[in-house]
Image (cartoon, rainbow, N blue to C red):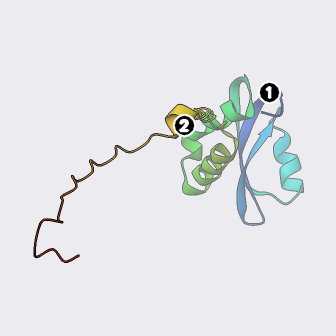
Amino acid sequence: MATDKLFNVAGVSKLNGEYKVRFATDIMRIKVLAKHGHEDIRLAELDTAVTKLEAVKQLATMDEFQDVAAQSAIAEYLDEKTPKAKAAPKAKATKATAKVAAPKAAKAPKVDTSAMEDAPF
């Protein structure tokens, strides 16, 4: 995460038809969101101050955020902000393993056709 801030209030709100997750340190954030045109503002006080990612994980389990709009905003936030596991570095192939030769086919034995009368050549 880019920040170490802790929040004890989190929720969702709708602005311009789009729901987003919101964070605050005080429940009075509702007034500021309403003043700026947000609708369907739902904030919940958390038990302890937590990071944004932990707050969103708590929101996902709360009853008041179980509707489709809230769950969609929560899922979108988690998709974007959950740290991705780094892929294991690829092992470099050594020259010995990179040049694995296919087994050679056995050569057919030569047949002396000079003594044959019907030989085409």
Tell which of 26 and 49 is nearer to you.
Answer: 49
Q: Is residue 91 left or right of residue 54?
A: left
- Residue type, numbered disc 2: Thr
Which percent across, then down, holds residue 52? 74, 34
**Quadrant hosting residue 115:** bottom left
- Residue type, numbered disc 1: Leu
**Quadrant hosting residue 58:** top right
- Relative to residue 88, is residue 60 depicted above or below? below
In the rendered structure, which disc, 2 or 1, sits on the residue that comes first in sequence?
Answer: 1
Res. 60 visible in picture: yes
Residue beneath label 1, please? 6
Res. 41 visible in picture: no
Residue beneath label 2, please? 61
Which percent across, then down, holds residue 46? 69, 29
Tell which of 16 and 45 is nearer to you.
Answer: 16
Q: Is residue 58 left or right of residue 35?
A: left
Secondary structure of the residue carrying numbered label 1: loop
Q: Residues within 10 Å of mark 1 (few under 14, many from 20)?
A: some
- Relative to residue 105, is residue 91 depicted above or below? above
Secondary structure of the residue carrying numbered label 2: helix
Estimate the spatial distance between the alpha carbons at disc 2 and disc 1, rounded to whole Å.
Answer: 19 Å
**Quadrant hosting residue 4:** top right
Q: Residue at x 34, y 46 (%)?
A: 104
Which percent across, then down, holds residue 59? 62, 38
Task: Select label 2 or label 1 by which is in front.
Answer: 1
Q: Residues within 10 Å of mark 2 (few under 14, many from 20)?
A: few
- Relative to residue 55, is residue 113 depicted above or below? below
Q: Residue at x 27, y 51 (%)?
A: 107
- Relative to residue 96, is residue 79 depicted above or below? below
